[in-house]
Image (cartoon, rainbow, N blue to C red):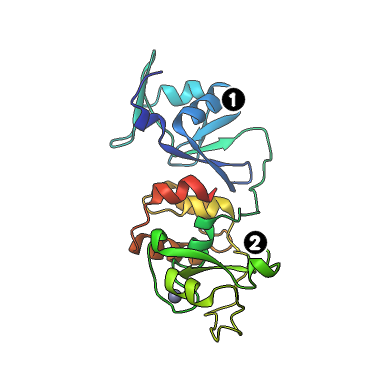
Amino acid sequence: MSGTSRELATQVLVINRHMQAVHITSARRAFVLMWTDIARALDEHWVAHAFDSWSTRPAREGDPTVGTSRGLIGVPRVVQLSQYDRMPRSTIRLTRRNIFLRDGHTCQYCGRRAGPRDLNLDHVHPRSRGGPMSWENVVCSCRACNLKKGGRTPAEANMRLLRKPVRPRWSPILALAFAPGRPPEWEPFLANLPGAREIASLWADALAVGVSDEALLAESA
Ligand SMILES: [Zn+2]
């Protein structure tokens, strides 16, 4: 199989037999899943094709293609697992980028929106006094507010949180799959997932402060 690394890295949505989005993979991996009949490519009419059938279809205009011994093959936008009832992972990782994403890249004390370089993680109940690293105790804050608050609680520092921090409702697949520039073919498998509307607006916040979708994608899984 040949092709530029860009085409082989094209993101492909993996869905299970219940048509639920479970994962995002690369075109390279998607073809491996198809060769081994672990997954089948879904065409625009949601008909699932095994590798042989898919490889004889002409690629659609504008779709990425890779060269094989059989000629050019279109990269599928969606592949469906043929055997396993894998379910989407529901626990989103507690990472700096995911906290920034949850908080809309907005300081939770003064409301200033900024890029990741100008933001800090703030332990609401100070770490020095046993405050845990948890969704409920860590928020996005600007450097100025972080400095001002120091090792104090918000009450001691006379500062107020814009809102109570909670674990996000959105699943990891949603955080990834809702990145701007996603193929329209993914839409039907994402729209009904919990938190879909919320994540769309959080992504807009992230892009407004110059966060690239690649940077977020790399860490938000
Ligand atoms: Zn602030």
Q: Amino acid at mark 1?
A: Asp
Residue 37 image label: 1
User: Is 84 displayed left or right of 189 in the figure?
Assistant: right
Q: CA distance from mark 2 to mark 1?
A: 42 Å
Quarter of the figure with residue 40: top right
User: Is 200 displayed left or right of 136 in the figure?
Assistant: left
The residue lying at 43 percent from left, 53 percent from top is: 179
| Above/below status of 205 relative to 184 | below
* Disc nearer the start of the sequence (2/1): 1
| Above/below status of 126 relative to 71 | below
**Residue highlighted by disc 2:** 133
| Above/below status of 174 relative to 8 | below
**On the rendered image, what quadrant is the N terminus found in?**
top left
Tell me residue 217's x, y (percent).
46, 48
Q: Residues within 10 Å of mark 1 (few under 14, many from 20)?
A: some
| Above/below status of 3 relative to 61 | above
Q: Is residue 182 visible?
A: no
Query: Going by the picture, which residue comes out furthest to the top?
Result: 69
Which SS class for mark 1?
loop
**Count of numbered tags:** 2
Tell me residue 205's x, y (percent).
40, 65
